[in-house]
Image (cartoon, rainbow, N blue to C red):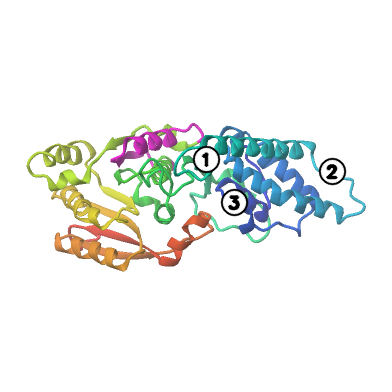
Amino acid sequence: MAFASVHPDLFQILRGYASLIPPKHLQFPSHLEAQAIHDFLVAHILTSAHFHAYPPSQQHQKSFWKWIIPHLEKKICADPDSELEVDSRVYEHYLELLTSSALFSSQAISRSVGAPGLTGQSPPPPSYITHFWSPENKVLPPNGSVNLGAYQTTTLLESRTMIEAGTTGLRTWLASLVLAQHLIRNPALVHRKRILELGSGTGFLGSVVASLQLLGPAPPGTLWMSDINDAVLSRCRDNVQLPCNSSSSHPDARCCFLDWSAALDPDGGIAPLTSLLYDEIDADLILGADLVFDPDLIPALVAVLYLAFQPGARPRCALVALTIRNPTTMQKFIETVSASGLVLETIHAQMDDRVFMEPVEGSGDANNGINIFRITRTSSRG
């Protein structure tokens, strides 16, 4: 992605486009010159090498251009002395999107004809999504310009449905953004540390952590990303290794299968899990986001944490970000952690759009609230 400086309001459009924010939630910068808006759209979106290699879904692109083209035309027409014309490539690209969308719709209907239980609606295909974030925790300037070179990007291929292939792990959830935001603001938490992430999903949090480790003092530390679903682990590995992500150059980032229920199986499963946790991973910090949407998972999760926290030569802790969807489930988690002898401290957190743009799908989670829990064996601040 070419480095340049752009107006903060144009940067917001870039972030929104990249992170699949519906256009109705974006604001057209009508106070800026038409030439500046036009040139920005052509240089940073239409002809961007990054978006050509890792494009947002065609549906999102179509919605974006359908929204912004009339705004741009109106802005140009407002100046009778302007000789500016919309670049023909903009119209050509939009026409291609319309044609592809119509073809996809007709094919979806054809596949559903005669198929019992189908309504003619096919699930949307996966899409690339790119998050811009500043390792220096910059606040967008109200005036002046934004230096794109000062921002990191994390790109992922994600499902656009809540559940795909029987798992919720193929998309990023809001709690992951909030925990990543906390780590970006406190990078010393991961610098030169041995990290284990539970329920890594798409690899978003792992990719951010890997990037933060690389930006810190050498050596960067180690990172283990874990999950129980093979398809999720494959997607996680692929996303972290995307050439556009700095995480791809991390010298010691790995993905591994980890079944929490093994921690509750004294007859066999706990031995290999103990070996993995102690002999291989040996984590200083354990991370997890949105891990207890199912209350039945809580005993196994806490058992894994307890096992990983067994006495050693150095202090260990976990940071677990949870969405407060069901107070009963949250209370069960807190009580189970306390009953295990672990110590739990609440870090109140909320989404800050200056760090990541909040996905519309996560607005309900944000309204429910998200807590980050710091869990240790003792009350020490190690």
Give the image location of residue 264, x and y in percent.
13, 48
**Segment colored magenta:** 215-244
The quarter holding residue 105 reads top right
Whether residue 35 is situated above or below residue 257 in the rendered picture: below
Q: Residue at x 21, y 46 (%)?
A: 260
Instruction: Where is residue 257? Give x, y as percent.
Output: 27, 37
Which residue is the site of mark 1? 127
Q: Which residue is mark 2?
A: 85
Separation of marks 3 and 2 at Cα, in angstroms: 25 Å
Badge 3 or badge 2: first in the primary sequence: 3
Residue at position x 49%, y 56% in the image? 361
The residue that label 3 is drawn on is 16
Above or below, comparing residue 351 to residue 216 in the picture: below
Q: In x, y percent, where is residue 106?
A: 61, 37
- Can the viewer see residue 1? no
Q: Nearer the viewer, residue 220 or 196?
A: 196
> Mark 3 to mark 1: distance in Å?
14 Å
Q: Amino acid at mark 3?
A: Gly
